[in-house]
Image: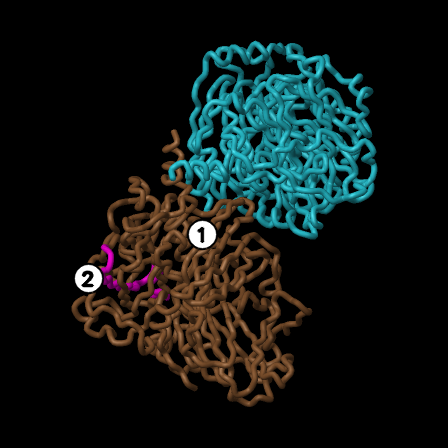
Chain colours: A brown, B cyan
Amino acid sequence: MMMMVMWWLTVVAGVASAAVKEYNWEVGYKFWRPDCKEGTVMAINGEFPGPTIRTNAGDIVVVHLTNKLTTEGVVIHWHGIRQYGTPWADGAAGVTQCAISPGETFTYKFTVDKAGTYFYHGHYGMQRSAGLYGSIIVDVAEGEREPLRYDGEFNLLLSDWWHQSIHSQELGLSSNPLRWIGEPQSILINGRGQFNCSLAAHSSKEQMNRCTFEKGDQCAPQILHVEPNKTYRIRIASTTALASLNLAVQGHKLVVVEADGNYVTPFAADDLDVYFGESYSVLLTTNQDPSRNYWISVGVRGRKPNTPPALTLLNYRNVPAADLPSSPPPETPRWNDYDRSKSFSKKILSAMGTPPPPKKSDRRLILLNTQNQIDGFTKWAINNVSLSVPVTPYLGSIKHGLKGAFDPKSPPKNFPADYDITKPPANPNTMPGNGIYTFPMNITVDVILQNANALNPNVSEIHPWHLHGHDFWILGFGEGKFRPGVDEMAFNLKNPPLRNTAVLYPYGWTALRYVTDNPGVWFFHCHIEPHLHMGMGVVFAEGVNRLGKVPPEALGCGLTGKMFMNRNR
Amino acid sequence: MMMMVMWWLTVVAGVASAAVKEYNWEVGYKFWRPDCKEGTVMAINGEFPGPTIRTNAGDIVVVHLTNKLTTEGVVIHWHGIRQYGTPWADGAAGVTQCAISPGETFTYKFTVDKAGTYFYHGHYGMQRSAGLYGSIIVDVAEGEREPLRYDGEFNLLLSDWWHQSIHSQELGLSSNPLRWIGEPQSILINGRGQFNCSLAAHSSKEQMNRCTFEKGDQCAPQILHVEPNKTYRIRIASTTALASLNLAVQGHKLVVVEADGNYVTPFAADDLDVYFGESYSVLLTTNQDPSRNYWISVGVRGRKPNTPPALTLLNYRNVPAADLPSSPPPETPRWNDYDRSKSFSKKILSAMGTPPPPKKSDRRLILLNTQNQIDGFTKWAINNVSLSVPVTPYLGSIKHGLKGAFDPKSPPKNFPADYDITKPPANPNTMPGNGIYTFPMNITVDVILQNANALNPNVSEIHPWHLHGHDFWILGFGEGKFRPGVDEMAFNLKNPPLRNTAVLYPYGWTALRYVTDNPGVWFFHCHIEPHLHMGMGVVFAEGVNRLGKVPPEALGCGLTGKMFMNRNR
């Protein structure tokens, strides 16, 4: 398998040949059977998942998004697209724009500056969990050559699915006592899963219902039809709300080549851990017995699973697609084998040619992740602040210098040195806050994510942290409490992976570095939908004073909305 | 029973002693057991139904309404309050204001100019069905004497309740094929009903579960505790979405004295028909055997009922409240005994002193009510227009002279003379529209509501029509097609009831008259929540050019919102 990695050049060249890709989208609810049981999904132009955006690096994407919901606002975040020069198009409600009200149309316009595998999703309330998501696939710029060589490709967008409505989920999470959403009922591959039946029932030792489908069934699996002895690129992204996933293709190696829109040093794996908010490309060569089919299995890790794996088939074309393998699907690795998980994470290293991180940082934040309470309500907090996103988007209140929109005081940059991360918080009470971290332009920031024990003893959860507006380098993972002056000695400054999402392991730390080179206000948060809803995020701002025009349509709410109204008086 | 009716003087006098009643309200979802089965309700300050506003005629009510919903907008309509001079406070989304977005506060401020029994409710999507409602009780002005004489009073706010979420209901109604919401699971009295059990199980011939309650149970009935030989005023209002109701108190006569905030000529009845959007006061004298209790029963009429009656008790104080009557509750009159229903409606006549209608009208609209289809979607239409409320509230686009917000052409003022109201529409297809009827100030308008056959043969439904901003006189009810030049000869011009809601019977007509004396834009619509959602309404406007300031906060959406933004450029 030949492969050339020269993506940095691609980016620069791509900008020259910019084309405009324009879409008219309508968001509305639809009755649908994602996992063979009917529910309601948030669909785009009637499609679930939403339409795939396929474009070339350097292209300009224009999405006219019309809200056809009856009473709910909506926004869409373009996950992994850095929004250089267009921070108002980032689609984070309360951070970069006001939610789009029913009946209104908002136009997102941004450059997709880098080839890779991305996705988009709702970023208001828990609308992502309602199914508001789809894929963005960016090919290399027109006229450029894709450095990876493959004969065909597939795209797998992974998600998890609940039968409880998001409104009821949101209410439960905001209730005292907390009503936890529980484990998902189903895992979906491209919006398709099977609840209460299994494709692999015949090969299981357990008693399971066998799935049957009618033609055109909304929950029937999409089968990957392949030719023998070819190489396929499989794009994989996870927009799950709660489930850490592991993907395996029976009998086949997966060569990991891309992570979050950045090429990585290729390595072969038997299976792939995929955390919430991550995307990957793997190359798969169809070098196995072509007279049979193979399971593709996507199972749950990181939490004690109570959801059966999602299944589909790798179908060698000369075999009928209906021929199910007689052997059971690959078994998902043990959910709490964190050593295995960490070993996988550490294999992901940037490809040759990837820009290395600056050798030193100018600022450092250490962000303690804790589960807390406010007046008996369960929350998540960072350095003892549980984020409560304000009504006026930060981007607007900062740009227009409006006071009173949020707490002007920065949240803490560290946590008390004597905090014991191995135990439940000594004082579980925290406060809501909406202060942000503001940085000068073009400095290097290190962020150390520090995990800790949750409210119950002997519990520390995985948190996948996603940064808007930037990629960051993952400099390292560590156990226990980060030791300043010691642990940075082991940072990988040579070939750390450049990503937009990083996992934080239980009781450990994860070190990130990024450069404040993108004027705007950027959400940085746990990508677990209920954790974000419970306050697990922070906000970074840089160079907002350098910004050009922000479309007023992004700011027609809160104090910016009042500003527009009052200037007319 | 002594009774003096001199309310017209009361109104005028009341204005002099205006007090301000100020409320801070937060709207949010809450888990609740309205009918002993848990669901989610839309609560105000955690209360369901919302808090009762109790005030005096002439007072100014100020409600600071904060939207604490996660992603949904909200408004509140003050049903029966005419909003003289404050049409922007009428709370009809898309007509008089933009929905209040999550996190925002909107201040309603209006004068309650007339004593009576009113209520408030959500008027956006189907939020009324989610439980967003409460009572408004207006006493006579400070220093005035209530013309009715009674020793105590009770307030019964009636509603119907579904276990399906309103989001799912809305989606079903907007789906092709239509998914009808079906009959309600329960009827609620002051937000309390009993699903799957009956208070009267012991006295029923049918096999029923007997209800048991724990202390403080959210679904336990509120019992009316009375002394013997006293007279009580029972205020009754119906905010049902679908159910026409009939209320009876075992063994007791009800003397009807008020309808929709207007005194009526008292008459005694064994039971009371209450249609959606109507309010009444009845006087009940506790002149029965004081050694037992009596059922209060609220059953369904007007549609083939599939919902058991709501029950509570009239408890004579010397009897334990737990002593249930041994005889069964009063039987609700047959649902389709329309002769009985009409006979009741015709008994409601204005009290002495009520201003009579002008003798002649200046304009006449004849509004044909039909069930139709648009591209296979089931709709309701008026003169073949199914109302689609625009994004920009009419009040704003008219006041600011903005073009393009709605169709400037008036909808038809009549329907084709050869239309056969006894059969399904020959051409069932209709079109959405958002044109309105505009009238000069201070003219007299007659509105003839004309019922017809629905899409299925031999079906014609009851429709309760509610007008915002005005009371109207109900001049008459008739069978079949209204005959211009003939039927108006029988109009009651002497003592027609003055009301804000009028029922339209199957295959019949109802004639209303009102004076355009209130500058504003006024919704006039069927008060059946799903019918309104399916387009069954029209809009009247008068004198918008005379209006003073409209708070810009009411208009921060659509073209008015854009106007505010663009003036700054």
Q: Which residue is drawn at 28% across and 60% down?
A: A517
Q: Image quarter for residue A484? A: bottom left
Identity, as a three-letter code, of the amino acid under mark 1: Tyr
The relative height of residue A331 versus residue A183 in the rendered view (above or below) is below
Question: What residue did someone put label 1 on?
Answer: A124
Q: Is residue A416 visible?
A: yes
Q: Does the magenta stretch include residue B464?
A: no
Q: Image quarter for residue A502? A: bottom left
Q: Image quarter for residue A482? A: bottom left
Q: Which chain carries label 2?
A: A
Q: What stretch is highlighted in magenta?
A: A440-463
Label 2 or label 1, whichever lies nearer to me, is 2
Question: What residue did someone put label 2 on?
Answer: A362
Identity, as a three-letter code, of the amino acid under mark 2: Asp
The relative height of residue A464 versus residue B338 in the rendered view (above or below) is below
The relative height of residue B317 versus residue A544 in the rendered view (above or below) is above
Q: Using the image as rendered, state which of residue A418 and residue A283 is in the foreground.
A: A283
- SS for dot 1: loop
Disc 2 with disc 1 on a shared chain: yes
Looking at the image, residue A188 sits to the left or right of residue B473; the answer is left
**Distance in Å between CA atoms under marks 2 and 1:** 33 Å
Q: Mark 1 lies on which chain?
A: A
Q: Using the image as rendered, state which of residue A260 and residue A87 is in the foreground.
A: A87
